[in-house]
Image (tube, helix red, strand yellow):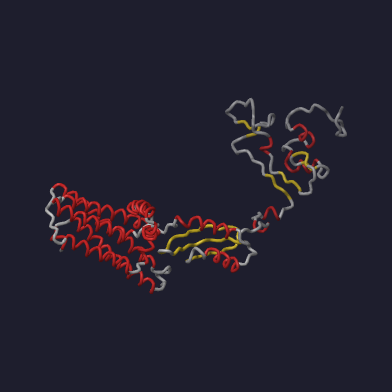
Amino acid sequence: MWCSSTNSIALTAYTYLTIFDLFSLVTCLISYWVMMKKPSPVYSFGFERFEVLAVFASTVLAQLGALFILKESAERFLEQPEIHTGRLLVGTFVALFFNLFTMLSIKNKPFAYVSEAASTSWLQEHVADLSRSICGIIPGLSSIFLPRMNPFVLIDIAGALALCITYMLIEINNYFAVDTASAIAIALMTFGTMYPMSVYSGKVLLQTTPPHVIGQLDKLLREVSTLDGVLEVRNEHFWTLGFGTLAGSVHVRIRRDANEQMVLAHVTNRLYTLVSTLTVQIFKDDWIRPTLSSVPIANNILNLSDHHIIPMPSLKAADSLNPVTSTPAKPCSPPPEFSFNTPGKNVSPVILLNTQTKPYGLGFNHGSAPYSSVLNQGLGIPGMGTAQGFRTGFANAPSRYGTNARGQPRP
C-alpha cells in the first residue's frame, strides 16, 4: 500500500526483499520440522532435502522479482512518473528494521550454511575490498567487516542507503529518474546475491559431490584400498544429502579368506569421519581356479572304440570309372587331359586298428597285417589279380613280367 501511494519503484524493489525475508522464516520453520522428523521407509534418507528445496525456491523467487523490477524500470525510463516522498523515507526504515530483525534475531540454519558455503557475490567482493582499505586505517573494525559480511545484511543496508539517496535527490532537485536508477541497482544487487545460493542449493538437489571434499574423499579411498584383505574399491558415489550432510555408497571386493565383518568395520571407520550416511557392500573375490571337470569333453574322446573309421567319399551313380586311367568319365564327353578325382575317391572306408604303431601309408599296418588282409579291406580294385592288381592298379594292362608254372615272377 505504501509503494502504491508513493509511486516509487525503488521502494517496491526493496519490499521484495521483505517478501524474501518472509520466505526465509518459512524455511526456518521447515528446518525445525525436519529436525523433529525421523527417516521413514518412504524417505529412508530423512527429510533434509526439504529445507534444501525451500532455500532453492526462495532464492529463485527473489531473482524472479528482481527481473520483474528490471522490466518495470525499463518502461519507466520512457515516461518517468512523479514520486511522492511522504512515506518513502518512513517505509525505508520500517523495511530495514524488519529485514535486520528477521536475519539477525532468528537462527536460520539453512540460510546461514548456504551464505557461508556458496561463492561470494560481486557485492561482497567489492565491499571486502573497501573493508580492507578501511581496516587498514581503523584496525578495530576488522572483526565487523572481515573476512566477509553477511550477504543478507549487506543487501539490506545497501538497499536502504540507495533509498535514502533517492529521497534526498528528489527532495532537493525533484530528480525523479533517480528512483528508477535506485530500483535497477537494488534489483541487480538482489540478483547477484541470490544467484550463488541458487547454484549451490541446485547442485545439492542434483546430488553432486561438493568440490571442497573431493580431495579428502580421494585420500580416504586410497587409505581404504590399502587395508588388509581389500582388493578393489569400485562404484563409489558420494553426494550431498542436505546442508552439511554427506551420503555415499561404495562396493568393496575382498579376498576369499578375509573376514567380511572386520573389513566392513575398518572401511566404515575410515569413511565415517567425512560421510555420515554410508552404505558399504562387501563381496568376496569370485575368481575360481579352472578344473578339468568344468571343461566339456566329448564321449567319443574319453571312451575310444576299438577301431578308428575314416570315411571315404564315393562316386555318384551317374559317374563311371575308366579301367585304364582310373578317372571318372562320362559317355558323351571326351576323355579329360587332367583328372583331379583320384582313385582314393572310390575306396570304401578304411578301418585302422588301435594297436598300430607306425603307419607307413593309408590302411597299412607295419608288421601286423598281411597283404591279403589289406586287399580284403578294399584297397584292391575288384576284378583284378591279387598281387598284380595291388602292384599296378590296372585291370586290363598286360603284365611286363611273366610268371612260371609255380607262380613265381620270371626275371
Pinpoint residue 117: horizontal percent, then vertical percent.
Answer: 40, 59
Pinpoint residue 373: horizontal percent, then vertical percent.
Answer: 78, 43
Which is more toward the observer, 27 or 147?
147
Q: What residue do we see at 69% from left, 42% from top?
A: 348
Left or right relative to 159: residue 287: right
Relative to 332, is 234 above or below? below
**Viewport quadrant of the C terminus:** top right
Left or right relative to 195: residue 162: left
Q: What residue do we see at 22% from left, 53% from top?
A: 182
Which is more toward the observer, 102 or 262?
102
Relative to 377, is 48 above or below? below
Pinpoint residue 409: horizontal percent, then vertical percent.
Answer: 85, 31
Left or right relative to 354: residue 91: left
The quadrant holding residue 257 is bottom right
The quadrant holding residue 50 is bottom left
Pinpoint residue 398: horizontal percent, then vertical percent.
Answer: 76, 27
**Viewport quadrant of the N terminus:** bottom left
Check the image and name the residue furthest to the front. 137
The quadrant holding residue 17 is bottom left
